[in-house]
Image (cartoon, grey):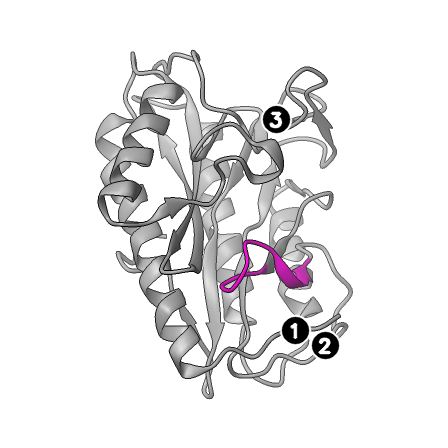
Amino acid sequence: MSIKIKTAEQIEGIRKSSRLAAEALKYLEQFVVAGNTTELINQKAHEFVKMHNARPASLNYHGFPKSICTSPNEVICHGIPGPYVLKDGDILNIDVTTILDKYFGDTCKMYAIGEISSEAKKLIEVAGQCLRIGIEQCRPGNRLGNIGYYINEHAQKHGYSVVYEFCGHGVGLKFHEDPEVSHIAEKDTGPRLRPGMIFTVEPMINEGKSRAKIDKVDGWTARTIDGKLSAQFEHTILITDTGNEALTDVYHEF
């Protein structure tokens, strides 16, 4: 494992790209309504990112055909925007990664369409708590594994499971770098965190079983194996001298 320590210049570039990714999620809120397709949201995201002289990192990444990921209801991650029409009661994750002046910023959040069930509300609430709990462990000298340890502990306390087949990752100079950030881990394991490290924390919390199944047709869409709901939030995190900075948390919403 080779974890890059970013320079001050690189950190500033990654900060700007991360801010743009967060602004894209905020911009897309107006389109996440019943009756709109996920393809429309993809088009609006693509236009917004290009308008800000940046590129969507997902587009054509290992063949991924769209500019963002849209994952409704039982879709855990990597949902491909398309003809799916949003309806009242749906929950939707949108994942945006931007490339601005060669630097990457990565974030995702949950949206509720109309009035959602109390079960869906609780799942989204706990998923947000899991993200915050993981970020609390992001400080110099701490072990990387403690992020996943405390996320999993909190999710299980509420009767949920944590997806272990996907993880967070280093980001900034590339879309995916070292380290892998597991959201289930043994306590006090892994490398020690150091100032200048940048990676994502992005726990995927399932209402039912933790396993995922990949769509055999598109090769990307990951769904829960039992059809139950999944929720996820993500921030790009910088380890600082005194703690951390959530580079994509410019609106302090989750």
Q: Nearer the viewer, residue 2 or 115?
A: 2
- Residue 17: percent from left, percent from top: 35, 59
Q: Classify mark 3: residues with Cα within 10 Å, few (<14), some (14-19) or many (20+).
A: many
Query: Which amino acid type corresponds to the residue marked 2 in the rendered image?
Result: Pro
Of callouts 3 and 1, which one flags the residue occurring earlier in the amino acid sequence?
1
Tag 3 near tag 1, CB within 8 Å: no
- Which segment did they paint magenta? 170-181
| Numbered mark located on residue 111 in the image | none
Q: Is residue 177 magenta?
A: yes
Left or right: 39 as drawn, with respect to 47: right
Query: Which amino acid type corresponds to the residue marked 3 in the rendered image?
Result: Thr
Which residue is the site of mark 1? Answer: 3
Cα separation, mark 2 vs mark 3, equals 31 Å
In this view, the mark in front (2 or 1) = 1
The quadrant holding residue 11 is bottom left
Pick the quarter of the image with the N terminus: bottom right
Q: Secondary structure at mark 2?
A: loop
Q: Secondary structure at mark 1?
A: loop
- Residue 100: percent from left, percent from top: 35, 56
Tag 2 near tag 1, CB within 8 Å: yes
Query: Which amino acid type corresponds to the residue marked 1 in the rendered image?
Result: Ile
Of callouts 2 and 1, which one flags the residue occurring earlier in the amino acid sequence?
1
Tag 2 near tag 3, CB within 8 Å: no
| Numbered mark located on residue 221 in the image | 3
Q: Nearer the viewer, residue 167 or 124?
A: 167
Identify the residue shown where x is 41% and y is 21%: 90
In this view, the mark in front (3 or 1) = 1
